[in-house]
Amino acid sequence: MGNCLVAQSGGPTSVINATVAGVVKANQLNPIYETVYGGLHGIEGILQERFVDLTNMTEEENRILRQTPSSALGSCRYKLKRDNIADFEKLFEILKKYNITTMFYTGGNDSMDTVLALSEYAEKHGITGHQFVGCPKTVDNDLVVTDHCPGYGSAAKFIANTTLQTWLDVNVYTREEVFVLETMGRDAGWLAASACLSGKVDVLVLPEVVFDKELFLEQVRKCVAEKNKCYVVVSEGARFADGTYIAAAESKGDGFGHAVLGGAGHAVKEMILSSGAAKRVKVQDLSTAQRCHATDQSLTDVEESFRLGMSAHMRSQDPTFTGMMVGLKRLDTPKYEVEFVAVPAGEVANNVKNVPAEWILPNYAGVTQEALDYMRPLVEGQPVIEYENGLPKYTTPFQYR
Amino acid sequence: MGNCLVAQSGGPTSVINATVAGVVKANQLNPIYETVYGGLHGIEGILQERFVDLTNMTEEENRILRQTPSSALGSCRYKLKRDNIADFEKLFEILKKYNITTMFYTGGNDSMDTVLALSEYAEKHGITGHQFVGCPKTVDNDLVVTDHCPGYGSAAKFIANTTLQTWLDVNVYTREEVFVLETMGRDAGWLAASACLSGKVDVLVLPEVVFDKELFLEQVRKCVAEKNKCYVVVSEGARFADGTYIAAAESKGDGFGHAVLGGAGHAVKEMILSSGAAKRVKVQDLSTAQRCHATDQSLTDVEESFRLGMSAHMRSQDPTFTGMMVGLKRLDTPKYEVEFVAVPAGEVANNVKNVPAEWILPNYAGVTQEALDYMRPLVEGQPVIEYENGLPKYTTPFQYR
């Protein structure tokens, strides 16, 4: 009987650990692997043989792991390059040493490329007995083929909740005011678009639409004229026709030289103030909190992430199951339902799924009903979260135990 | 039978509406007032006779009001100046016109000063039949006499949760990194200190302690050297010996001239980077969300806010009860318990309660166990929050109905 290895990569999410919990739980229900290893810090730690034994995790530990945000096994930005043969050789040596027959890797584009590269390398070199299975996760929701990505629903829920709450806040005063909410999303606007679930967004700026400063300011001006307020949501990835991020452009010549100081939100604030479109602008940059504020987890998201881990484990019983990613397919049912499907990792790697053009309303007016119908089920449901001394109980990251 | 008026002032909180709900509920249990008016936008709206009738709010509406953040009646920054006789005359005329015998006013320092000013004016001019009762609320927790302020517990819980969550996030990578969390608190450090409930804060900068840049950077350097990471919490009110806010000082000469662009968090980031204390710094400015992220409400906080409104209503049966604020007194019991007490508004107005010096550890090392024991019960408990379509159900602000 062989062992399996599960590791996490890329930016963390509020539910990424649920996939690990799913793999562990599936193996307890059907112990096809003797040991379930957790690899610390993704490929980077695996190359250093930094493993922990997750096999006999208790139900209590499993439950807490599911509600813990961020990557409990640690993550890495280390990219396995195809021409770095030494890395590949070392990795397969380690897999052999620990008798690891299946490696589950959770992550986004880059991680699916790693899954692809490893399975291709094995095939090319006639190495048998190792399977590589990808589990998608990314708050950005930008993977193709899968209907959506675990992690997105919870981030979207936090963003929509915060939009609703800050909209209420900005509306307490009678004074003229613009509120700017900045979300993540360097290439795709899914996170910014999720703010529209609140029904309170007046102006939405996505990376999918070339930023036209004058048109944008005109919308803000109109909105302020009409109701004295304007709620703007801007994606960090918003950019001009020449591809420059609006954040970078606005911070040019500021003497600082740090484009990161003021992000897209602050850039937009500068534009509004200096153009006189409004006299008062407040900015909220959701920053790191949007991908880890797990007290706002979506139940749908946690459960799908957990089941996806179970599905990946179960499918790996088939020895030909390698170089694949387990994705989500939305069924054509009146009530939202998904099934788990297997897709070649190569179809996912290095592609980006954008918000479809036909879902984006003109003049920065938000997204269509179809887009809202797509997002709504993903934020539904609240898990019962366990607390201790007033704060949520979280797993101590394995790398710090 | 007379009527009463309840209005909200100052910056909103996650539980300020619960006090209004408490006044309304108390009057349903014991209808000593014929009508419970809600005054829109505080004094500003009252002077324009912008009233809504809250008397017969349903239990469902009451429940949703308690979970709704921000000021459902709207707020104002309008300060009733003692020499503006016209305002006072107009206000008493309106109270007479609507047969309002008691006015409940929720707010912070300024609002308690309004309560004081109105009751003094009535006494001085021999105007009888009107009572003015203050209900404290402020996320800043900076009112004297009362043990703590409704609104603080929920903000503290959101901050502590976010600290825990972002600490997990920043620890997923092996790289050297400093995380800086900026909280509100222009004069008092209660909000910044609440981050310490997470047990994850390495360096804490409060407005109560003069900011010594070199000493601060030394602590960051030490921490990074020890564990490759450093979690810094800084209050927006942190300032140098000469009283300059650190945010303002660092943005001098940047060509922008906007001290607000980068707050204290960004100022600290600049210091760390330019001194070489660390190579990578991430900033999260909690901004508006910290005072309205009601999906992280503390049950203790909501219940106290609600009961405080009830207590204020009940006490107003005594016709001599005016110019008073209803505060909270912590009992000397093993398990946390409070009683509601009446204190003269004059003792509260225009004073600030700081984090006591003896609760602050030297070298920016955080706060003492005593401070944690003070804060802990205030964040305890999670209310059952009602959701609809995946998002929390909130009251439509009365001014927009």
Image (cartoon, coloured by chain):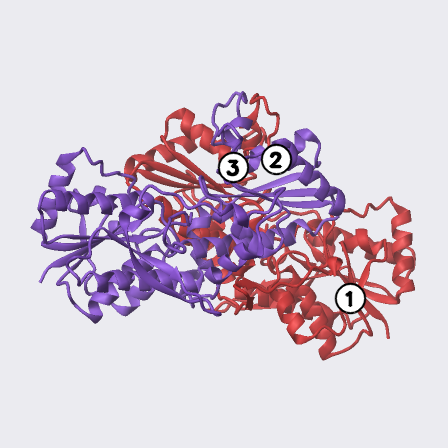
Chain colours: A purple, B red
Asked if the residue under mark 1 is in contact with the one under mark 2, i.e. CB atoms within 8 Å, the reply is no
The span from disc 3 to disc 1 (Cα, nearest Å) is 57 Å
Q: Are marks 2 and 1 on the same chain?
A: no
Q: Which residue is mark 2?
A: A269
| Badge 1 density bin: few <14, some 14–19, many ≥20, Cα 10 Å | some
Give percent across and percent down for residue A334: 49, 69
Question: Which residue is drawn at the image coordinates 36% and 44% (left, top)?
Answer: B170
Q: Are marks 2 and 3 on the same chain?
A: yes
Q: Using the image, tell me which numbered label, if any, was put on residue B113.
A: none
- The chain letter under disc 3 is A
Q: Is residue B155 visible?
A: no
Q: Using the image, tell me which numbered label, if any, was put on residue A238.
A: 3
Q: Which residue is mark 1?
A: B321
Q: Nearer the viewer, mark 2 or mark 3?
A: 3
Q: In the rendered view, does B55 fall on the left or right side of A119?
A: right
Give percent across and percent down for residue A142: 41, 47
Q: Amino acid at mark 1?
A: Phe
